[in-house]
Image (cartoon, grey):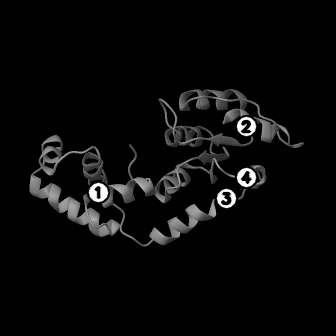
Amino acid sequence: MREGITGVVNSQPDMVIVGEASDGRAAVERFRELRPDVTLMDLQMPGVDGLEAIGILRKEFANAVILVLTTYKGDVQALRAIKAGARGYLLKGAMRKELVDTIRSVSAGHRYIIPEVASEIAAHLIEDALTERETVVLSCVAAGNSNKLVAQSLSITEETVKAHMKNIMAKLAARDRTHAVAIAMRRGIITM
């Protein structure tokens, strides 16, 4: 994937790839060395993930321009990336022209979120977000645990787990536990 992106970017008369990294920690180090005008950042990387790397870079370099290039279509992941300091959010399957146009746009100070993700953000904007505890409970359920096992692992009662699941299903408009997990994974609320 990186070779393809490098080819596309380097074929532009006004762009050049100055460095690459295969994980978040290396991305932060390469940024410190090279100070690129625009950084393309994946969210899913070993060790330090993309969200954490964005946060580190934005704390050290307030003007860092970061464009997330990912496979995650979820509105929650996009919001997390933007809140962490990314200037744009683009899917890896983007067309060649869209990639270079977006790089130019974020470099010029604009923000960009791919329309299908932006519409998901808008659709869920007024909904109640899951609390941190609800997200943890749902992650445990997604791992295949029963209410009893979730309760034991979180040191809460089984009734509390059931109450959390009831709230989660209401907030996500889910029919059942499996549907709640599927919705949460699609939106990027939880990842596996």
Tag 2: amino acid: Gly
Q: Amino acid at mark 1?
A: Thr
- The first of marks 4 and 1 along the sequence is 4
- Residue at which label 3 appears: 111
Q: Note whether 113 is above or below 41 in the view shown.
A: below
Q: Earlier in the sequence, mark 2 or mark 1?
A: 2
The residue carrying pointer 1 sits among few (fewer than 14), some (14 to 19) or many (20 or more) residues within 10 Å by Cα, namely some
What element does badge 2 sit on?
Answer: helix
Helix, strand or loop at label 3? It is loop
Which residue has dot 2 on it? Answer: 4
Measure the alpha-carbon separation of dots 4 and 1. Answer: 34 Å
- At 78% across and 53% down in the image, what residue appears? 97
Mark 1 or mark 3, which is nearer the start of the sequence?
3
Query: Which residue is found at the position 48% from the left and 71% from the top?
Result: 123
Q: Are marks 2 and 1 in contact (CB under 8 Å)?
A: no
Residue projecting furthest to the right: 13
